[in-house]
Image: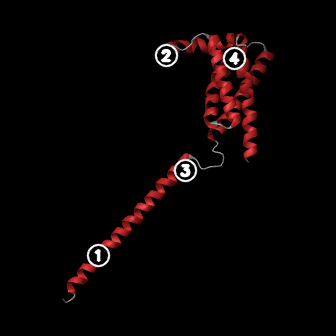
Amino acid sequence: MRPVRGAARAMLSAIFVANGAHAIINPDPLVPRAKRVTDRVSPLIEKVPAQLPTDARTLVRVNGAVQAVAGLLLATGRGSRGAAAVLAGTLVPTTLAGHAFWEHDDPAERRTQQIHFLKNIGLLGGLLLAVADTEGRPSLRYRTGRFVGDRRRSIKRGVRAARRDARIAVKSASVGRHLPG
Protein backbone atom coordinates (compact mmCIF):
# COMPACT_ATOMS: atom_id res chain seq x y z
CA MET A 1 0.00 0.00 0.00
CA ARG A 2 2.97 2.33 0.53
CA PRO A 3 3.66 2.86 -3.21
CA VAL A 4 0.01 3.77 -3.73
CA ARG A 5 0.13 6.33 -0.93
CA GLY A 6 3.34 7.83 -2.31
CA ALA A 7 1.95 8.07 -5.83
CA ALA A 8 -1.34 9.52 -4.58
CA ARG A 9 0.46 12.17 -2.51
CA ALA A 10 2.62 13.12 -5.50
CA MET A 11 -0.40 13.40 -7.79
CA LEU A 12 -2.37 15.40 -5.23
CA SER A 13 0.49 17.81 -4.59
CA ALA A 14 1.47 18.40 -8.23
CA ILE A 15 -1.12 21.12 -8.82
CA PHE A 16 -0.04 22.99 -5.68
CA VAL A 17 3.64 22.90 -6.59
CA ALA A 18 2.97 24.04 -10.17
CA ASN A 19 0.46 26.76 -9.28
CA GLY A 20 2.55 27.89 -6.31
CA ALA A 21 5.65 28.29 -8.47
CA HIS A 22 3.61 30.16 -11.08
CA ALA A 23 2.22 32.52 -8.40
CA ILE A 24 5.72 33.26 -7.13
CA ILE A 25 7.14 33.96 -10.59
CA ASN A 26 4.16 35.76 -12.13
CA PRO A 27 1.64 36.95 -9.51
CA ASP A 28 0.18 39.84 -11.55
CA PRO A 29 -2.56 37.88 -13.40
CA LEU A 30 -3.80 36.51 -10.06
CA VAL A 31 -3.89 39.81 -8.15
CA PRO A 32 -7.28 41.14 -9.39
CA ARG A 33 -9.09 37.96 -8.33
CA ALA A 34 -7.12 37.71 -5.10
CA LYS A 35 -8.24 41.22 -4.10
CA ARG A 36 -11.69 39.77 -3.32
CA VAL A 37 -10.15 38.00 -0.35
CA THR A 38 -7.11 40.16 0.44
CA ASP A 39 -9.20 43.32 0.79
CA ARG A 40 -11.17 41.57 3.54
CA VAL A 41 -8.11 40.00 5.20
CA SER A 42 -5.77 43.02 5.10
CA PRO A 43 -7.42 44.86 8.04
CA LEU A 44 -6.99 41.73 10.15
CA ILE A 45 -3.34 41.37 9.13
CA GLU A 46 -2.65 45.01 10.04
CA LYS A 47 -3.75 44.28 13.63
CA VAL A 48 -0.97 41.69 14.01
CA PRO A 49 2.06 43.30 15.72
CA ALA A 50 4.58 41.79 13.28
CA GLN A 51 5.25 43.51 9.99
CA LEU A 52 3.29 41.30 7.61
CA PRO A 53 2.55 42.31 4.02
CA THR A 54 -0.96 43.50 3.25
CA ASP A 55 -0.81 44.24 -0.47
CA ALA A 56 -2.48 41.70 -2.74
CA ARG A 57 0.57 41.06 -4.94
CA THR A 58 2.80 40.11 -2.02
CA LEU A 59 0.07 38.00 -0.43
CA VAL A 60 -0.37 36.11 -3.72
CA ARG A 61 3.37 35.40 -3.79
CA VAL A 62 3.41 34.32 -0.13
CA ASN A 63 0.44 32.03 -0.74
CA GLY A 64 2.23 30.61 -3.79
CA ALA A 65 5.38 29.97 -1.78
CA VAL A 66 3.42 28.28 0.99
CA GLN A 67 1.59 26.09 -1.52
CA ALA A 68 4.79 25.16 -3.38
CA VAL A 69 6.70 24.23 -0.22
CA ALA A 70 3.78 22.38 1.36
CA GLY A 71 3.17 20.60 -1.95
CA LEU A 72 6.78 19.43 -2.06
CA LEU A 73 6.57 18.24 1.55
CA LEU A 74 3.37 16.34 0.78
CA ALA A 75 4.88 14.80 -2.36
CA THR A 76 8.01 13.62 -0.56
CA GLY A 77 6.11 12.31 2.45
CA ARG A 78 7.97 14.56 4.90
CA GLY A 79 5.41 15.93 7.33
CA SER A 80 2.70 15.02 4.87
CA ARG A 81 -0.18 15.34 7.34
CA GLY A 82 0.86 18.85 8.37
CA ALA A 83 1.57 19.83 4.79
CA ALA A 84 -1.86 18.59 3.72
CA ALA A 85 -3.47 20.64 6.52
CA VAL A 86 -1.60 23.77 5.38
CA LEU A 87 -2.62 23.16 1.77
CA ALA A 88 -6.25 22.69 2.83
CA GLY A 89 -6.05 25.99 4.71
CA THR A 90 -4.68 27.84 1.69
CA LEU A 91 -7.08 26.19 -0.73
CA VAL A 92 -10.23 27.69 0.81
CA PRO A 93 -9.40 31.38 0.21
CA THR A 94 -7.81 30.53 -3.13
CA THR A 95 -11.01 28.83 -4.25
CA LEU A 96 -13.25 31.63 -3.01
CA ALA A 97 -11.08 34.26 -4.71
CA GLY A 98 -10.41 32.46 -7.96
CA HIS A 99 -13.62 30.61 -8.69
CA ALA A 100 -16.56 32.67 -7.47
CA PHE A 101 -18.90 31.23 -10.10
CA TRP A 102 -21.94 32.90 -8.52
CA GLU A 103 -20.61 36.32 -9.58
CA HIS A 104 -20.58 35.54 -13.33
CA ASP A 105 -23.52 36.33 -15.62
CA ASP A 106 -22.22 34.59 -18.75
CA PRO A 107 -23.46 30.95 -18.58
CA ALA A 108 -20.29 29.53 -20.17
CA GLU A 109 -17.97 31.41 -17.81
CA ARG A 110 -20.21 30.57 -14.87
CA ARG A 111 -20.07 26.86 -15.76
CA THR A 112 -16.28 26.95 -16.20
CA GLN A 113 -15.81 28.60 -12.81
CA GLN A 114 -18.26 26.18 -11.21
CA ILE A 115 -16.26 23.23 -12.56
CA HIS A 116 -13.03 24.70 -11.15
CA PHE A 117 -14.78 25.40 -7.84
CA LEU A 118 -15.97 21.79 -7.59
CA LYS A 119 -12.51 20.54 -8.63
CA ASN A 120 -11.02 22.48 -5.73
CA ILE A 121 -13.64 21.02 -3.38
CA GLY A 122 -12.50 17.57 -4.56
CA LEU A 123 -8.87 18.54 -3.91
CA LEU A 124 -9.90 19.71 -0.45
CA GLY A 125 -11.45 16.30 0.19
CA GLY A 126 -8.24 14.58 -0.90
CA LEU A 127 -6.21 16.85 1.37
CA LEU A 128 -8.48 16.08 4.32
CA LEU A 129 -7.96 12.37 3.66
CA ALA A 130 -4.21 12.99 3.62
CA VAL A 131 -4.50 14.83 6.95
CA ALA A 132 -6.33 11.87 8.48
CA ASP A 133 -4.06 9.21 6.92
CA THR A 134 -1.88 7.51 9.51
CA GLU A 135 -0.29 5.25 6.86
CA GLY A 136 -1.75 2.13 8.43
CA ARG A 137 -0.42 2.85 11.89
CA PRO A 138 -2.80 3.25 14.80
CA SER A 139 -3.91 6.80 15.44
CA LEU A 140 -2.71 8.86 18.38
CA ARG A 141 -6.16 8.56 19.95
CA TYR A 142 -6.03 4.76 19.74
CA ARG A 143 -2.49 4.58 21.09
CA THR A 144 -3.32 6.93 23.97
CA GLY A 145 -6.44 4.93 24.83
CA ARG A 146 -4.46 1.72 24.71
CA PHE A 147 -1.75 3.20 26.93
CA VAL A 148 -4.32 4.39 29.50
CA GLY A 149 -6.09 1.01 29.43
CA ASP A 150 -2.80 -0.83 29.94
CA ARG A 151 -1.92 1.41 32.88
CA ARG A 152 -5.35 0.87 34.47
CA ARG A 153 -5.02 -2.89 34.17
CA SER A 154 -1.52 -2.73 35.62
CA ILE A 155 -2.74 -0.67 38.58
CA LYS A 156 -5.66 -3.04 39.20
CA ARG A 157 -3.25 -6.00 39.16
CA GLY A 158 -0.99 -4.21 41.61
CA VAL A 159 -3.91 -3.43 43.94
CA ARG A 160 -5.11 -7.05 43.82
CA ALA A 161 -1.60 -8.31 44.57
CA ALA A 162 -1.26 -5.87 47.48
CA ARG A 163 -4.61 -6.99 48.93
CA ARG A 164 -3.65 -10.64 48.54
CA ASP A 165 -0.30 -10.04 50.23
CA ALA A 166 -2.04 -8.15 53.04
CA ARG A 167 -4.50 -11.04 53.61
CA ILE A 168 -1.61 -13.51 53.67
CA ALA A 169 0.29 -11.31 56.12
CA VAL A 170 -2.76 -11.03 58.41
CA LYS A 171 -3.30 -14.81 58.32
CA SER A 172 0.40 -15.45 58.96
CA ALA A 173 0.36 -13.08 61.91
CA SER A 174 -2.73 -14.71 63.42
CA VAL A 175 -1.27 -18.22 62.93
CA GLY A 176 1.99 -17.06 64.48
CA ARG A 177 0.16 -15.94 67.65
CA HIS A 178 -1.42 -19.37 68.09
CA LEU A 179 1.81 -21.33 67.82
CA PRO A 180 3.44 -22.40 71.07
CA GLY A 181 6.65 -20.98 71.98
Nearer to the camera, 35 or 108: 35
Image quarter hosting the C terminus: bottom left
Q: Is residue 100 visible?
A: no
Name the outermost residue toward the right: 108
Instruction: Give the mark nearest the N terminus, 4 or 1.
Output: 4
- Mark number displayed over residue 114: none
- Which of the two discs, 3 and 4, sits closer to the camera? 4
Q: Which residue bears the numbered disc 2? A: 50
- Residue 163 locus on image (x, y percent): 33, 69
Q: Which residue is mark 4?
A: 24
The reply, left or right, for residue 77 in relation to residue 40 is right
The residue most toward the front is: 181
- The residue carrying mark 1 is 169
Residue found at the far left of this picture: 181
Alpha carbon separation for disc pair 2 and 1: 68 Å
Which of pointers 1 and 3 lies earlier in the amino acid sequence? 3
Q: Residue at 25% of width from left, 83% of height from top? A: 175
Report how far apart the C-alphas of labels 4 and 2 lie in the structure: 22 Å
Task: Report the amino acid beneath label 3.
Answer: Tyr
Residue 148 seen in the current view: yes
Task: Check whether the beta carbons of the residues at disc 1 and disc 3 lie within 8 A of each other.
Answer: no
Q: Earlier in the sequence, mark 2 or mark 3?
A: 2
Mark identifier at residue 142: 3
Badge 2 local density, few (<14 within 10 Å), some, or many (20+)?
few
Point out residue 134 in the picture as x, y percentages from the top left corner.
Answer: 63, 44
**Residue type at mark 4?**
Ile
